[in-house]
Image (tube, rainbow, N blue to C red):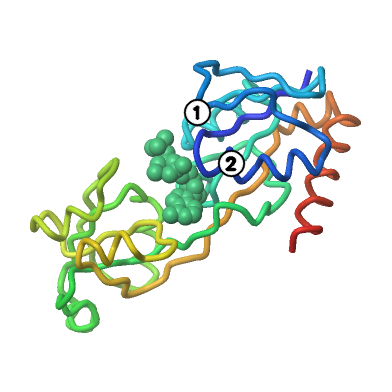
Amino acid sequence: MITLALSKGRIFDDSLPLLRAAGIEVLEDPEKSRKLIIGTSRPDVRVVLVRASDVPTYVQHGGADLGVAGLDVLLEGSEGLYRVLDLNIARCRLSVAVREGFDYAGTVKQGSRLKVATKYTHLARQFFASKGVHVDLIKLYGSMELAPLTGLADAIVDLVSTGSTLKANHLVEVEKIMDISSRLVVNPAALKLKREPLRALIDAFEAAVKARS
Ligand code: ATP
Ligand code: MG
């Protein structure tokens, strides 16, 4: 049996066409069913649904053989995984945003401390350290956009795709930290034990990604 970890929402939705191209139909819609383990048209392949940030943990500890996770999640904290393929799905960017009118460039130039709210404290710390900017990091788990509006922080580090959420909250993107997309990750031990079927599946994913680019 091959177990693939996916998260509900955009990663699941964007993975479906790739799975289909690889000859795998997922047998249930996670938005309709409450099942956490879903079968596929391949009797030897099943999907487990986990939180986006839990995908690396499942794959690392062998709860799944492979999984799909955002580069943001992988870089923020994961180890013991092979990052085998850029699937080019769930694309966005990790950026710094501030309230309209806030002088980000000036604050950075003057060397003042910057209060930054984010879910990505590790990546944010790395980024500002590389620029030599002193930051006080505030860890949040959601609704980052609220932080600059309430005075909790001067800036946020968050994922941006169209920018419409920022705009709706009178925030502006002032600096891109990195481009993000989702990656196929594999458990190294599984790759040894189930080499043939996993290799075939990875190759099928790769062909599907190439066909779409
Ligand atoms: P949870 O709801 O469990 O806390 P989450 O909110 O991070 O997880 P999603 O919003 O589905 O879950 O995001 C999953 C992944 O999709 C992220 O890790 C990121 O790589 C990518 N992603 C997030 N936001 C966007 C976006 N606006 N556009 C494109 N991709 C995105
Ligand atoms: Mg989300």
Residue 213 versus residue 79 in the image, above or below = below
Name the element at disc 2. helix
Amino acid at circle 1: Glu
Residue found 28% across the figure and 63% down from its top: 166
- For the C terminus, give its image quadrant: bottom right
Q: Is residue 186 left or right of residue 93?
A: right
Q: Residue at x 36, y 50 (%)?
A: 120
Q: Which mark is residue 31?
A: 1
Query: What amino acid is at disc 2?
Result: Asp
Determine whether, in the image, residue 54 is placed left or right of residue 208.
left
Q: Which residue is mark 2?
A: 13
Name which of mark 1 and mark 2 comes first in the sequence.
2
* Residue 38: percent from left, percent from top: 64, 20
Q: Position of residue 37 (x, y in %)?
A: 61, 17
Residue depicted at 58% across the width and 38% down the height:
12
Q: Residue 77 or 7: which is nearer the viewer?
A: 7
Residue toward you, 3 or 106: 3
In-image side of 154 versus 161 (left or right): left
Q: Left or right: 208 with respect to 76? A: right
206 versus 108 height, above or below: above
Quarter placement of the N terminus: top right
Q: Residue at x 85, y 45 (%)?
A: 203
